[in-house]
Image (cartoon, grey):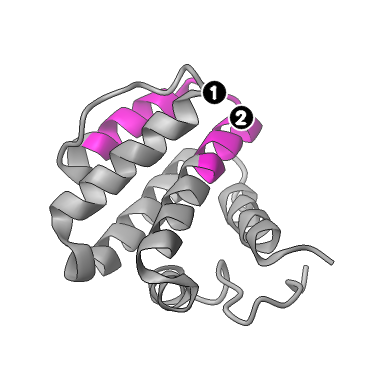
Amino acid sequence: MATVHEQRQRRIEHALLREPGAVVDVSIRLWEQLATELNQIIGERGVESMYARSLHQSQKQFNWLTPHPPQALAAAMTALRASLQGQADEVACAASTAMMMHFINTLILLIGELLTNSILLKAWGDDVVNNAGTEPNE
């Protein structure tokens, strides 16, 4: 049986690959939806800092991701879009998933898994988030 972490990762990958050729657009949309929910809790600067940290951590595995210091989300999304567009869908999906998982894992450390799941559910819906931690129906 897969762990909650593995299930979350698979659901993100599935969401990113659901629309062929749209990995970049879906990735940006998921980041923006998550940021919208988190801005109310940790503020824009908090989201920007956590995003920059997840980017930095993911660059160890995906060195083609464009580094930048914490900046406004719109500018960060423009940089992310430019980095992802040069990659095959599977590679862009892997990088986006890694970044989101670093971000989510940090969020879990800061506010706990229950509140994180609640935020993810509100941002992404049950289509991406399996709040109960059970096997996804795929």
Residue 71 forms part of the magenta stretch: no
Give neighbour class at mark 2: few <14, some 14-19, many 20+ (Cα, 10 Å): some
- Tag 2: residue type? Val
Q: Residue at x 64, y 59 (%)?
A: 5
Which quadrant of the rendered structure holds the N terminus? bottom right
- Tag 1: residue type? Gln
| Residue behind mark 2 | 91
Q: Find residue 26 and report its horizontal and vertical position in percent.
A: 46, 50
Magenta segment's dominant SS is helix
The relative height of residue 122 versus residue 99 in the rendered view (above or below) is below
Residue 11 shows up from this direction: yes
Q: Find residue 44 and report its horizontal and vertical position in percent.
A: 15, 55
Q: Find residue 38 and report its horizontal and vertical position in percent.
A: 27, 65
The relative height of residue 61 versus residue 101 in the rendered view (above or below) is above
Q: CA distance from mark 1 to mark 2?
A: 6 Å
Marks 1,2: beta carbons within 8 A: yes
Q: Secondary structure at mark 1?
A: loop
The relative height of residue 95 versus residue 17 in the rendered view (above or below) is above
Residue 95 forms part of the magenta stretch: yes
Between 20 and 55, the residue placed more toward the observer is: 55
Q: Residue at x 46, y 17 (%)?
A: 64
| Residue behind mark 1 | 87
Which span of residues is magenta-colored? 76-98
Specify the farthest residue to the right.
1
Q: Residue at x 41, y 55 (%)?
A: 30
The relative height of residue 118 versus residue 76 in the rendered view (above or below) is below
